[in-house]
Amino acid sequence: MRYIPWVPYTTDDWSTRHSVLTTARRTAALINAVADDRADPSTVAEVLRAYGELDPIDLTSRDVAAMRTAAAQLREVFAADSAADAAATLNHLLREHTGPLRLTSHGGSTPWHPHLDHEDDAPWEEWLLASSCMALTVLVWDHQRPPGRICASSACQNVFIAHGSGPERHYCSRRCATRERVKAHRRSPRALEHA
Ligand SMILES: [Zn+2]
């Protein structure tokens, strides 16, 4: 028998780009992108591309407006402060807005993976809700705590995925963390003494 070396699945790259954590991070990035009233289809398409969506991305202003409504519903999962709260919100979304669990390979163009939207050509807002519910549900299952948070900076409304390496995060970005640290320092009595 000829020795056949083990070759990683050629779609390994696809699987990495579409891991549960990456999908959840894409959800957060899309919620943040469409939160801006001025967000246009090209801005949203850029986020989708950054998370592995292939061109052509057919996205209209109407799609973006519908995604904004879906994002507002998903934001509630990020506002949850306990696993039970996140689960209740997700259960509501799963009941009202997603189809039954199914597998698709998009006609053989991707590895088989689970979807919760009704069909591969579902509207963008349905796709956003379904793919987000899927990833956030698995994160609650896996970690038994809320999958994400809303940035603790009062000047910021961004959501972010709380899981990852390093200590627990309270801010969406280094920028927000630094801004709040500077603010707290200015407020502290020591800072006033030296003012
Ligand atoms: Zn922030």
Image (tube, rainbow, N blue to C red):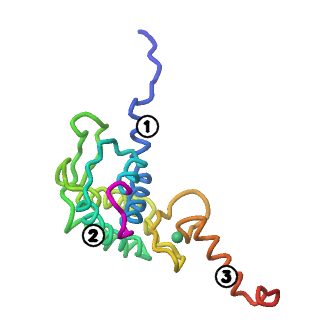
Rendered residue at 43%/48% (across/down)? 50
Mark 1 CB lies closer than 8 A to ligand 1: no
Q: What label sits on residue 13 in the rendered view?
A: 1
Q: Amino acid at mark 2?
A: Thr
Q: Amino acid at mark 1?
A: Asp
Q: Is residue 122 left or right of residue 178?
A: left
Q: In whole angstroms, how far apart are the C-alphas of marks 2 and 3?
A: 35 Å
What's the magenta region? 35-43
Secondary structure, mark 2, is: helix
Q: What label sits on residue 184 in the rendered view?
A: 3
Q: Is 36 covered by the magenta stretch?
A: yes
Rendered residue at 53%/76% (across/down)? 152
Q: Is residue 186 left or right of residue 93?
A: right
Q: Position of residue 166 (x, y in %)?
A: 61, 60
Q: Report the quarter where the C terminus lies.
A: bottom right
The local crowd at label 3, few if under 14, some if 14 to 19, many if 20 or more residues have their Cα within 10 Å, is few
Q: Amino acid at mark 3?
A: Ala
- Circle 2/circle 1 CB separation < 8 Å: no
Q: Is residue 186 above or below residue 28?
A: below
Instruction: Looking at the picture, tell me which residue is in the foreground, 1 or 72.
Output: 72
Q: Position of residue 6 (x, y in %)?
A: 46, 23
Q: Is residue 70 above or below residue 1?
A: below
Residue holding disc 2: 69
Q: Which is more foreground, mark 3 or mark 1?
A: 3
Instruction: Looking at the picture, tell me which residue is in the foreground, 114 or 28.
Output: 28
Secondary structure, mark 1, is: helix
- Circle 3/circle 1 CB separation < 8 Å: no
